[in-house]
Image (cartoon, helix red, strand yellow):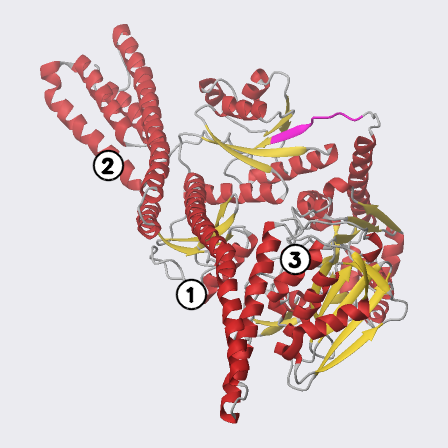
């Protein structure tokens, strides 16, 4: 049973303009598990595409030894797999580069959730598919519902099996078409028993475990529900487009609160499922408080943020001292309708100290925003609220605090008789205040409690016991204990806040200094060197800046500003980042085995290079440092963009000045030369008449002078014609003319330039007189003939052919020369353009004049290479649309 669902227009992938590669279309064959017939259905569809005249290629298909599937592969073009050696075994993987080089219309790629072999370009096959789509290649692929990232935890609960190979739900959302391949659990179990799914003992194991009826029923329901969600979204999109009222609620938006713990993975997936069911966008929010987190928590938080991005969330990181108030501020700023928070277990005293749990605070202050409190997954420990974890400190800090407490206690014992035990309490409080400025919160609170107990045990009568005799002493001790804890807490908070503000100031100062010293540097090279040193010192890392060249390709060598040397592997990662505009390398999910983190220098007008950062030692970047690094990369990109604009503006000024000078010379020189040339030509002819006879040894010189004068006359006339064209004063004087007379006049006008060539004229029957400007067309055909003669070998044939079809007159001039290089085809009509292999002489104006004259007729001229060799220039004139009168050429 097969269901097709075409995605609505809102999910179609579009490109901003026609110059960019149009992304390919993605079709996913979705099933509940292996054996339902996804690959079979996909290959059937591929064969239909082949029969319809498309160009499908089997990039990779896993038949698992099934005869029916193998039979469908016969006759389909296939690309050999890439062989990878891993731990003494040979793995076969998709040859991504071969598919990109082959560039078929359609690539068949099985099992999108597959994990690629080590050292592959991408860790997952679905990332290979995304690269194929970006290259304009459409893809058919297969996917089981248990491999969807948002469904993996539910599958684990249903089947007690953990699915390790997953794909982000965004892949499903980007699909242009989803085809559900469905059979009943009973039919699938029958196929399994017939060894059509797995072979041998593996089939028996699967039947006793994963392929139980209750598991298959749940997976089938999940598959149909996923398809139903997409179908429902398509229906509602159509309702919106057609303006049909419906019972759906608009404006739903979810926000999940996350922190540094694996506990939040299930929370993120739960929110993604709810957002999918509600067909709404969702946000993953993290509040960065004044309490720093450790390396392990940083890595966990980075993984959670990455998971949220993969599942399609908009990630927002906001700073604030109060987590609840900050979350509500983010929610209101982003029009969130529901907040998702994890259910945490906290001691009663902890809730009292902080005004209740985070969930309770959100519920009390949320107003019209709904709050979902979600129970952690089974088997995962409940975790405390993000942003409230204490700071334990390192062993050296504990030892130092304990030693100082012991020393001052000994000093207090020495002076206790002099100052009295009542004065010892304030001195201990002074120590707590000083400790709060130096040590973490947990140490300060512990020292406060120990100081209170030491004061009681060693100084308050009766000594060396915790018993207190006088009510006054009891009151004083209790007050001391509370005040010590309060002072320790407040002092630690002030210290943490100070560190937090220092971190923010450090970030702001870094951005300001970089902008000031780099952007305002007299030379970009000096500014980049200064900026590179600043970034390296700030992040304790080595960096490399690989910049874009003038031809918009990435430089093969990094800029000398950085100290990080990139090997071939790192250079290839940087090249990938430059081409895709996405981060890759260390601390990312793409090309993870790279030693450095590579960030694109992305500005509004494009990518200006790649920033590569390699931390010293085992250092990793926390959230604030990663955020700072991305901000620095953006600032460097903006500076490079500004420099690009300055250079472009300078070049434009030079070009404008040069164009102005060229135009002035262009307008004046031909007129200044025409009169002297006419006098020179007349004087030469008069001199020849007076000489009466020319000696044989002088004849060659005479012919050379005559040829040079003729050539100079052609050049000056071309310059004058181009001046008229640019001024917009070329007018067509339309009159009835015979096409054969026009061709004969053009051949005569070309004169000696065609000497040594055979001119063949072919005029189709039915062409008699046409309404055109005979002079301009003769000059145009003449220029094409002269151009053909220049490029043709001696005694070769130059053909002129005229055809009239559908009211358009085509005059084509073809030669037997070397043809036009592909890179020159679009430039041959540019002014003063001459091919790199052009013979000496000529001004590069002849073809430009042809284009100007033909445009004046409302026609076109094109250059092309002939299959049998040589070049052909074709003039197309819309004769049926010509009328008596004049037509001005647009300037």
Q: Is residue 642 visible?
A: yes
Q: Is residue 64 above or below residue 733?
A: below
Q: Which residues are magenta?
A: 248-255
- Reading the chain from its start, which is encountered first: label 3 or label 1? 1
Name the disc covering residue 567, or none.
1
Q: Is residue 80 visible?
A: no
Q: Is residue 270 above or below residue 330?
A: below
Asked whether 99 or 198 is in front, the reply is 99
Nearer mark to the viewer, of 2 and 3: 3
Identify the residue under disc 2.
Answer: 400
Name the disc covering residue 852, or none.
3
Q: Residue at x 86, y 48 (%)?
A: 3
Q: Is residue 39 above or below residue 173?
A: below
* Among the 4 quarters of the image, the one containing residue 197: bottom right
Mark 2 secondary-structure assignment: helix
* Among the 4 quarters of the image, the one containing residue 131: bottom right
Q: Is residue 691 above or below residue 265?
A: below
Nearer mark to the viewer, of 2 and 1: 1
Q: Residue at x 63, y 61 (%)?
A: 849
């Amino acid at each position: 049973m097969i269901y097709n669902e075409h995605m609505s227009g809102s999910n179609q992938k579009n490109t901003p303009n026609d110059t960019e590669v149009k992304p390919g279309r993605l079709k996913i064959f979705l099933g509940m598990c292996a054996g339902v017939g996804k690959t079979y259905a996909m290959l059937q569809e591929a064969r239909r595409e082949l029969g319809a005249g498309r160009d499908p290629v089997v990039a990779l298909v896993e038949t698992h030894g099934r005869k029916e599937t193998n039979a469908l592969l016969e006759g389909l073009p296939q690309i050999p797999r890439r062989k990878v050696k891993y731990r003494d075994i040979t793995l076969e993987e998709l040859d991504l580069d071969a598919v990109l080089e082959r560039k078929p219309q359609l690539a068949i790629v099985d099992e999108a959730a597959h994990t690629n072999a080590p050292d592959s370009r991408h860790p997952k096959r679905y990332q290979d598919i995304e690269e194929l789509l970006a290259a304009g290649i459409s893809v058919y692929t297969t996917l089981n519902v248990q491999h969807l990232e948002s469904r993996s935890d539910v599958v684990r609960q249903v089947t007690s099996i953990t699915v390790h190979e997953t794909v982000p739900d965004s892949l499903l959302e980007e699909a242009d078409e989803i085809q559900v391949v469905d059979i009943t659990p009973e039919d699938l179990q029958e196929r399994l028993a017939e060894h059509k799914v797995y072979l041998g003992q593996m089939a028996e194991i699967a039947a006793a475990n994963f392929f139980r009826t209750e598991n298959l029923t749940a997976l089938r329901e999940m598959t149909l529900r996923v398809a139903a969600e997409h179908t429902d979204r398509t229906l509602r999109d159509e309702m919106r487009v057609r303006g049909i009222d419906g019972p759906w609620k608009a404006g739903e938006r979810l926000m999940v609160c996350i922190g540094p713990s694996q506990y939040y993975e299930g929370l993120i997936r739960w929110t993604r499922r709810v957002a999918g069911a509600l067909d709404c966008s969702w946000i993953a929010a993290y509040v960065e408080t004044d309490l720093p987190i450790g390396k392990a928590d940083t890595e966990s938080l980075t993984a959670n943020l990455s998971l949220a991005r993969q599942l399609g969330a908009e990630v927002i990181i906001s700073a604030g001292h109060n987590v609840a108030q900050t979350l509500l501020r983010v929610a209101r700023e982003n029009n969130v309708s529901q907040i998702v928070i994890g259910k945490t277990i906290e001691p009663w005293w902890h809730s009292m100290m902080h005004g209740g749990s985070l969930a309770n605070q959100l519920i009390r202050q949320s107003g019209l925003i709904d709050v979902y409190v979600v129970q952690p997954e089974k088997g995962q420990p409940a975790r405390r609220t993000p942003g409230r974890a204490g700071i334990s400190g390192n062993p050296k800090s504990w030892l130092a605090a304990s030693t100082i407490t012991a020393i001052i206690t000994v000093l207090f014992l020495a002076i206790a008789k002099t100052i009295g035990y009542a004065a010892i309490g304030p001195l201990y409080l002074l120590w707590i205040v000083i400790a709060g400025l130096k040590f973490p919160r947990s140490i300060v609170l512990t020292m406060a409690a120990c100081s209170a107990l030491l004061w009681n045990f060693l100084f308050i009568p009766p000594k060396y016991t915790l018993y207190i005799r006088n009510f006054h002493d009891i009151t004083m001790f209790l007050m001391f204990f509370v005040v010590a804890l309060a002072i320790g807490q407040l002092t630690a908070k002030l210290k943490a806040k100070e560190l937090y503000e220092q971190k923010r100031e450090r970030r702001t100062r870094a951005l300001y200094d970089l902008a000031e010293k780099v952007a305002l540097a007299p030379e970009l090279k000096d500014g980049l060197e200064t900026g590179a040193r600043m970034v390296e010192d700030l992040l304790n890392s080595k960096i490399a800046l690989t910049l874009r060249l003038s031809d918009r390709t990435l430089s093969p060598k990094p800029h000398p500003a950085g100290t990080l040397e990139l090997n071939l592997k790192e250079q290839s990662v940087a090249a990938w980042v430059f081409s895709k505009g996405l981060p890759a390398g260390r601390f990312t999910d793409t090309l993870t085995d790279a030693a450095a983190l590579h960030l694109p220098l992305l500005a509004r007008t494009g990518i200006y290079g790649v920033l590569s950062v390699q931390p010293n030692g085992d250092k990793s970047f926390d959230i604030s440092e990663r955020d700072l690094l991305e901000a620095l990369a953006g600032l460097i990109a903006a500076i490079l963009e500004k420099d690009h604009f300055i250079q472009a503006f300078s070049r434009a000024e030079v070009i404008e000045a040069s164009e102005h000078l060229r135009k002035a010379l262009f307008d004046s020189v031909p007129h200044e030369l025409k009169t002297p040339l006419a006098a020179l030509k007349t004087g030469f002819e008069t001199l020849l008449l007076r000489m009466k006879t020319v000696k044989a040894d002088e004849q060659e010189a005479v012919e050379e002078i005559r040829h040079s004068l003729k050539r100079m006359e052609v050049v000056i006339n071309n310059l004058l014609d181009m001046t008229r064209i640019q001024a917009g004063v070329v007018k067509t004087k339309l009159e009835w003319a015979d096409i054969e007379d026009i061709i004969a006049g053009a051949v005569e006008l070309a004169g000696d330039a065609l000497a040594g060539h055979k001119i063949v004229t072919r005029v189709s029957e039915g062409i008699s007189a046409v309404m055109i400007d005979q002079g301009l067309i003769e000059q145009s055909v003449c220029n094409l003939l002269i151009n053909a003669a220049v490029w043709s070998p001696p005694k070769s044939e130059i053909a002129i052919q005229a055809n009239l079809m559908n009211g358009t007159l085509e005059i084509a001039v073809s030669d037997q020369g070397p043809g036009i290089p592909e890179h020159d085809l679009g430039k041959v009509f540019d002014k003063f353009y001459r091919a790199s292999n052009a013979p000496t002489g000529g001004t590069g104006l002849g073809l430009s004049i042809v284009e100007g004259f033909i445009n004046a007729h409302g026609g076109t001229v094109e250059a092309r290479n002939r299959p049998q060799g040589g070049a052909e220039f074709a003039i197309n004139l819309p004769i049926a649309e010509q009328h008596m009168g004049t037509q001005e050429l647009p300037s």
